[in-house]
Amino acid sequence: MSAVSHPILVDPAARALAGAQLELSYAPELFPRLQDLAVTPVGEVVVCAAFAKDPHGQVVVELRLQAQLNMMCQTCLQTLTQNLQQQTVVAPVFNDAAAEKVNRDYDAVLLDENGELNLDTVIEDELILALPQVPKHVDGPCAERLNQALQTDADLVADDKPNPFAVLEKLQAEQTKTGKSK
Ligand SMILES: [Zn+2]
């Protein structure tokens, strides 16, 4: 697998006919755009790509991505290691017009003039799409501080809010009374 040369170009239509499945692993340095976003994979990114045709004859590639990424926590600005597991289906097309007709469940991806798909670009795009919008620690000191702040807010709100159901019950009881007296 280490002998694979990049970028990996495949003909999805031919692969779909053969029902091909590829197991790939990418070294972090193969994803420069991720690193520009201050996101660095820890170890290799593992990818499984399965080629098929859907019931409408559209060639599709099912991608399963597994990665561990170092990002910056937006609460404490320290490093956060995030496990990412992403499953997605892409539909290779020749142009934008064809992309618009693709089933909404798929991500349309453009083929080059030879009908080939650059898997490296597609995989990096999908990783970027799968990134959390606001990466944050879910445990550890910074998350605890945040939870405490939220808890205090919740207590304050709970104290001075009247129970809306109590008012409703009273109204209903009064309506039943007037209804009976008619
Ligand atoms: Zn943090």
Image: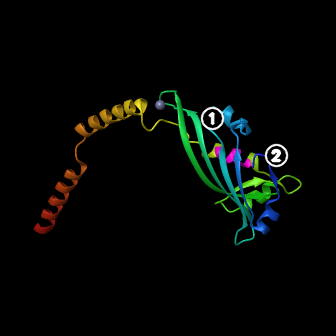
145 is within the stretch colored magenta? no
123 is within the stretch colored magenta? yes
Q: Is residue 167 above or below residue 149?
A: below
- Identify the mark nearer the N-term, 1 or 2: 2
Quadrant in the rendering for residue 128: top right
Please identify, in this view, whether the residue under mark 1 or under mark 2 is nearer the observer. Answer: 2
Tally the numbered discs: 2
Check disc 2 and give the amino acid type. Answer: Ser
Q: Is residue 100 above or below residue 33?
A: below
- Residue ranking furthest to the bottom: 55
| Mark 1 neighbour class, 10 Å CA radius: few under 14, some 14 to 19, many 20 or more | many
Tell me if the residue at label 2 has its CB under 8 Å from ligand 1: no
Name the residue beneath numbered marker 2.
Answer: 5
Check disc 1 and give the amino acid type. Answer: Val
**Mark pair 1, 2: CA separation:** 23 Å
Residue bounds of the magenta highlight = 122-127
Q: Nearer the viewer, residue 154 or 13?
A: 13
